[in-house]
Amino acid sequence: MRQLDQAPRPARSPDSVVVLAERPDRPCTVLAVLTSSSSAVFDNFGDLRQKMVIETALLGGDALILGPERRHSTLIFNTVSWVESVRKDGG
């Protein structure tokens, strides 16, 4: 996390945080830039998104502007077959 606005704000409930696909047209204050990633193969983007919603709520934010899902793949060879390991990043 890279916090951009240092003004203290009370924490909110994660249920009150609105998730947006893009920055709104009305003026807003960006509190922080959050990233979330996982090295586990079976984690999903929803889990990463929920972590960022919780962090947004702790910062006192009203909304999370969610960037696109990015994937980084690695092939792992074992003695039986090839296995693709996908690391998912939300940002």
Image: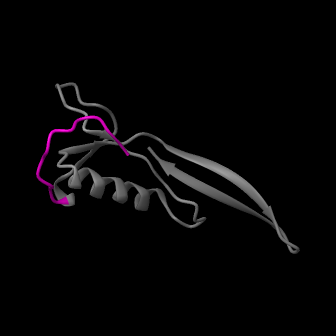
Seen at 12% across and 47% down, the residue is 9
In the picture provided, is 81 more to the left or to the right than 59?
Answer: right
Q: Nearer the viewer, residue 16 or 29?
A: 29
Residue 55 vertical placement versus 20 (above, below) = below
Q: Quadrant of residue 2?
A: top left
Magenta residues, dominant SS class: loop
Query: In this rendering, is residue 53 above or below 83?
Result: above
Task: Identify the colour scheme used.
Answer: one colour
Viewed as shown, does residue 58 lie left or right of 84? left
Q: Is residue 2 rendered magenta in the image?
A: yes
What x and y, as percent, mark residue 25? 22, 25
Q: Which residues are magenta?
A: 1-13
In the rendered structure, the answer to whether residue 9 lies left or right of residue 91 reads: left
Quadrant of the image for the C terminus?
A: top left
Q: Give left or right: position of 19 versus 88.
A: left
Q: Nearer the viewer, residue 59 or 25?
A: 59
Q: Residue at x 17, y 25 (%)?
A: 27
| Magenta segment includes 21 | no
- Residue 90 screen position, x and y as percent: 46, 48
Residue furthest to the left: 10
Marks counted in the figure total 0
Give x and y (percent) for residue 88.
55, 53
Name the image quarter holding residue 8.
top left
- Residue 81 lies, with reference to residue 13, above or below; the image says below
State the image coordinates of residue 57 (x, y, percent, origin top left).
21, 54
